[in-house]
Image: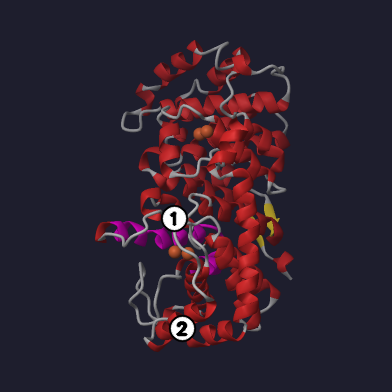
Amino acid sequence: MLREIYVNLNNIFLSLSDAIDLANPDIACHQMRCAYMAWQMATQAGLPHDRVKRLYMAALLHDIGALSPIDKTRLHAFEEADANAHCIQGEVLFQSVPLLAPAAPIVRHHHRDWRDCDQPISLPDVMDAQILLLADWVERLIQRHSFILNQMDGITHQIQSMEGETFHPDIVALFTATSNREEFWLDVTSSRLYGLLLREAPLRSTEVPFEDIASISQVIQKIIDFRSPFTATHSAGVAQCAALITGHFGYMETEVGLMQLAGNFHDLGKLIIPNAILEKKGKLTWEEFQIVKQHTYFTYEVLNSIDRLERVAEWAAFHHEKLDGTGYPFRVTAEKINTGARIMAVADIFTALTEDRPYRPGMPVEKALAILQEQVRDGKIEGRVVTLLGDHARDIAERVKEAQRDSLRFYTQHFSAPTAKKQVA
Ligand SMILES: [Fe+2]
Ligand SMILES: [Fe+2]
Ligand SMILES: [Fe+2]
Ligand SMILES: [Fe+2]
């Protein structure tokens, strides 16, 4: 049943790449621009199609391991002294998705200078990582507020001056041959780059079944949750809770799977929220809360741009809406909030109340249910969903904890600060 849902892989990767770079307007489309340059260079070099696809995929998501907006901005501005950590974390995330795993070595070495490499450039992993490194440098050298054609010669000279040190001479020659037409630079900086890549880039006709989309959603769940120990298992718990309630509602396996997907994605827009706000223990100020309110807007925007995931977009993004219209940011009322979105809203509150945070233990299930029932009485959330949750509360709470324990294990092993430092050393 689930196998009947197919999504265009280029569409999903482009939208997720875009979401990851939303953190700051100064880095918007960074990975997409790198993917364009890597694709053009690989094509110029006459690399086999499968290899071009692998490099394009790596480039689109190469900074996936840089989790916080500050990390991403500092890397982009050449301020991050240790670029290695996000390469290691990126490699781990790529390895966790079968579809992405072949591209993991490129991500691992996308900041390795040629002088630090002890393998021949003829090896595909070495050459492809060098292409991505060069694309990454070019993209960061572009001054976003100046006309690009006035910059192309200066950037090319700077790249050529790094030959033999940062880049292998063959890679510099490849870049020079690829970038010697204005079109290359105009494409890189075009505001229509998403559409251009969607129509023409290597994965344009690759459709993937639900199981691949599900494993991609798990990696996205990790980058959303692992931003902070405060949220390290939240989406994993919400996804499990929402899927279990959907099953108890009597929905088909397809809907249960899609709800799990929506749960993994529901806080996608939080990628743009600064850690200082995510980790604030006290009440948010009015201004901080306005920033938080954007997150479901972006969840909707990103998911809605993926063909055939429109239903998932609504289920995921309406979780802060209320039946009486007092939620945010869409302020929709009961008639516009479908059952999937009603389930997600309850799953989100229940998980948030019962999960442990570094500064407080989770609330007992009964107390959380009492709070939910109060919201039902106030006309905010769906009573049938809360009743179903209450009927199966013990089982659901246990399985939510189980999903969160699994996610925490991965987090502790690869992402908590001391571990990450140890791996780098
Ligand atoms: Fe990077
Ligand atoms: Fe980058
Ligand atoms: Fe949220
Ligand atoms: Fe949430």
- Per the image, the residue denoted by label 2 is 370
Q: Quadrant of residue 392?
A: bottom right
Outermost residue on the left side: it is 286
Q: Which residues are magenta?
A: 288-314
Residue at coordinates 46% horizontally, 83% vertically from top-left? Answer: 370
The reply, left or right, for residue 267 in relation to residue 249 is: left
**Main SS of the magenta segment?**
helix
Residue at coordinates 35% horizontally, 67% vertically from top-left? Answer: 329
Q: Is residue 250 magenta?
A: no
Counting from the top left corner in percent of width and height, residue 82 is at 50, 29
Specify few, some or many for label 2: CA neighbours under 10 Å numbering under 14, 14-19, or 20 or more: few
Q: Ligand 3 near label 1 (Cβ, under 8 Å)?
A: yes
The type of residue carrying mark 2 is Ala
Q: Quadrant of residue 377?
A: bottom left
Of 301 and 318, the residue lying toward us: 318
* Secondary structure category for the residue under label 2: helix
Q: Ligand 4 near label 2 (Cβ, under 8 Å)?
A: no
The type of residue carrying mark 1 is Lys
How far apart marks 2 and 1 lie (CA) works out to 28 Å
Q: How is the image coloured?
A: secondary structure
Q: Which of the numbered marks, if any, corresponds to residue 131?
A: none
* Secondary structure category for the residue under label 1: helix
- Per the image, the residue denoted by label 1 is 270
**Mark 2, mark 1: which one is toward the viewer?**
2
Whether 166 is drawn above or below 105: the answer is above
Whether 198 is drawn above or below 405: the answer is above
Looking at the image, is mark 2 or mark 1 earlier in the sequence? 1
Q: Quadrant of the C terminus?
A: top right
